Amino acid sequence: MTADDETTLPTDQQSPFVLRRPTLEDGGAMWRVARDSQTLDLNSSYAYLLWARDFAATSVVAERDGAVVGFVSGYVRPDSPGTLMVWQVAVDADQRGHGLAGRMLDHLAAAVPGVTMLKTTITDDNEASRALFARFARTRDAQHEETDLFVKAHFPDEGHDPEVLHRIGPF
């Protein structure tokens, strides 16, 4: 791990959280945090292991007292190198209320070179995520557009709600 891989979060007060790039060893914890969220689409544990290994530079984990308590997974769009696509954001229930999701997003926006645009998809009923990304746009005085991306007909399983694309930037 290098100094660039880890950021302790004291701003105006000392924070108990450390933000850093995930490692392969964090993949299982990322899967657990996603599972325990009970709101995210849970992928296989294998997917989180691959994510922690192959997309570490565009993802972040939050650690408290040596345990992973949150993560943001993302990737740079191959056809748009200035765009960070945020795939999942999750924080353990007992760690919510500290602004940790926003801090992780801020960390990624600053840590991924050349990124001036952020995109993510959110279902209409996920008010917490909608507020998180609206706040992210506001603090950067960035444009925030919402457009339908994946409608019900796109999903092969009948239980998935439509996903709205949120485009934030440039910032």
Image (cartoon, rainbow, N blue to C red):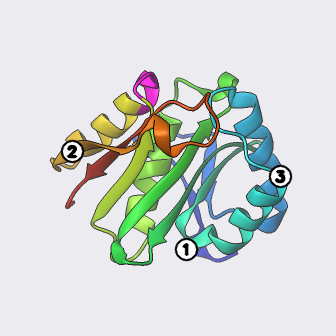
**Residue type at mark 2?**
His
Span colored in magenta? 124-129
Element class at badge 3: helix
Residue 42 versus residue 29: which sits nearer the camera? Answer: 42
**Residue type at mark 3?**
Ser
- Tell me which residue sits at (56%, 46%) in the image: 88
Of the numbered discs in the image, which one, if any, rests on residue 45?
Answer: 3
Q: Is residue 57 left or right of residue 107?
A: right
Q: Does residue 13 appear in the picture of this structure?
A: no
> Crowdedness of circle 2 by 10 Å Cα count: few (<14), some, many (20+)?
some
Image quarter (top left, top right, bottom left or bottom right) of the N terminus: bottom right
Q: Which residue is disc 1 drawn over?
A: 4
Element class at badge 1: helix
Percent from the top left, x then y, of residue 56? 63, 69
**Residue type at mark 1?**
Asp
- Tell me which residue sits at (57%, 72%) in the image: 57
Q: Which residue is disc 2 drawn over?
A: 144
The earlier-in-sequence mark between 2 and 1 is 1
Q: Is residue 55 left or right of residue 36?
A: left
Percent from the top left, x then y, of residue 37? 68, 29
